[in-house]
Image (cartoon, rainbow, N blue to C red):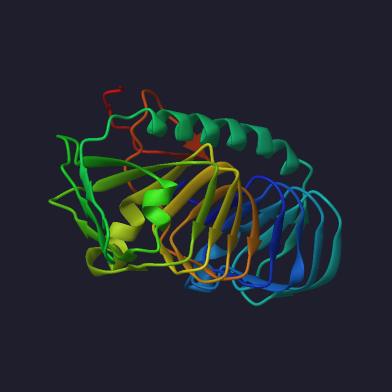
């Protein structure tokens, strides 16, 4: 997970940039897109795959700003290798999808079973901030549980966070449909380290729409994500219509699982955590 800026298990339709590395299990389509725009210097990414595509690529223009473009399916449109990479046809990419899907689904289920130990204070009758007050455990992990209706209420003006020393933040959001179109991330939520260490786990979600800038990693392996503004953090979803850029940082928080989870050959940090 800390190797990829974007993992889309199914199809990705995009006309936007992804700053880091990407894995697309299905088809990659759209007018034009750039990958690896913030992977610098270019020379450090020679030989790395940015992105990997398991299905067909039907982009008018694919701009590679760093690394290689590795694919299983066919390609139409042009490819520019501005970072000195190459195009590689490899049937193994399509075979990676099921493993990633199983791992992300298991992780989402496990995180969703964690007991909340931190507090949320939301608006009642008047517009106000939605306040997240962390109470981290001995491993520095803070867990919040809330519903999509709490998160997307039109009374929410800002999303605030008091970390209280938390080094990893898990936010479990329930409900099948999420439409985030009000509220701004403010204060520490805009901090790069906090964005990198926060994972929003959308339990059981099938559809997520983001019409406001989002901060932190998104984990929703069963959902189709549509964004119209930038996402400041990593994306791990079932499929995606990308109408806004996906920005670094990659997710680097602790993942509280009972065993090792390995994605893209990189071991995710393990932290023991109690279950409900």
Residue 96 is situated, as x and y percent measured from the top left of the image, at: 67, 38
Of residue 231 and residue 94, the one placed in the foreground of this image is 231
Residue 104 is situated, as x and y percent measured from the top left of the image, at: 53, 36
Q: Is residue 7 visible?
A: yes
Q: Is residue 49 left or right of residue 202?
A: right
Residue 39 is situated, as x and y percent measured from the top left of the image, at: 50, 68
Of residue 217 and residue 39, the one placed in the foreground of this image is 217
Q: Residue at x 47, y 46 (%)?
A: 1
Q: How many marks?
A: 0
Q: Residue furthest front?
A: 125
Of residue 244 and residue 51, the one placed in the foreground of this image is 244
Q: Residue at x 56, y 59 (%)?
A: 209
Q: Residue at x 59, y 69 (%)?
A: 66
Q: What is the quadrant of residue 16 in the picture?
A: bottom right
Of residue 189 and residue 251, the one placed in the foreground of this image is 189
Residue 178 is situated, as x and y percent measured from the top left of the image, at: 51, 52
Q: Residue at x 52, y 39 (%)?
A: 263
Q: Quadrant of the C terminus?
A: top left
Q: Is residue 48 visible?
A: no
């Amino acid at each position: 997970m800390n190797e990829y800026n974007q993992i889309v298990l199914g199809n990705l339709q995009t006309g936007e940039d992804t700053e880091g590395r990407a894995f697309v299990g299905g088809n990659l389509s759209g007018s034009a897109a750039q990958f690896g725009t913030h992977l610098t210097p270019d020379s450090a990414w020679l030989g790395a795959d940015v992105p990997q595509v398991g299905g067909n690529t039907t982009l008018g223009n694919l701009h590679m700003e760093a690394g290689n473009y590795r694919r299983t399916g066919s390609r139409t449109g042009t490819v520019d290798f501005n970072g000195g990479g190459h195009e590689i046809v490899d049937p193994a990419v399509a075979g990676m999808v099921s493993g990633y899907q199983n791992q992300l689904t298991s992780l989402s289920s496990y995180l969703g079973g964690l007991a909340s130990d931190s507090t949320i204070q939301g608006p009642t009758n008047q517009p106000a901030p939605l306040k997240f007050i962390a109470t981290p455990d001995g491993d520095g992990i803070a867990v919040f549980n809330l519903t999509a209706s709490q998160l997307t209420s039109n009374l929410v003006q800002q999303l605030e966070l008091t970390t209280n020393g938390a080094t990893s933040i898990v936010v479990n959001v329930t409900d099948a449909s999420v439409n985030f179109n009000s509220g701004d991330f403010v204060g520490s939520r805009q901090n790069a380290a906090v964005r990198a260490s926060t994972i929003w786990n959308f339990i059981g979600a099938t559809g997520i729409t983001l019409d406001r800038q989002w901060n932190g990693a998104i984990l929703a392996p069963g959902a189709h994500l549509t964004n119209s503004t930038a996402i400041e953090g990593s994306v791990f979803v079932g499929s995606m219509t990308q109408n806004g850029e996906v920005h670094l940082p990659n997710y680097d928080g602790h993942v509280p699982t009972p065993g090792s989870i390995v994605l893209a050959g990189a071991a995710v940090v393990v932290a023991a955590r109690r279950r409900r």
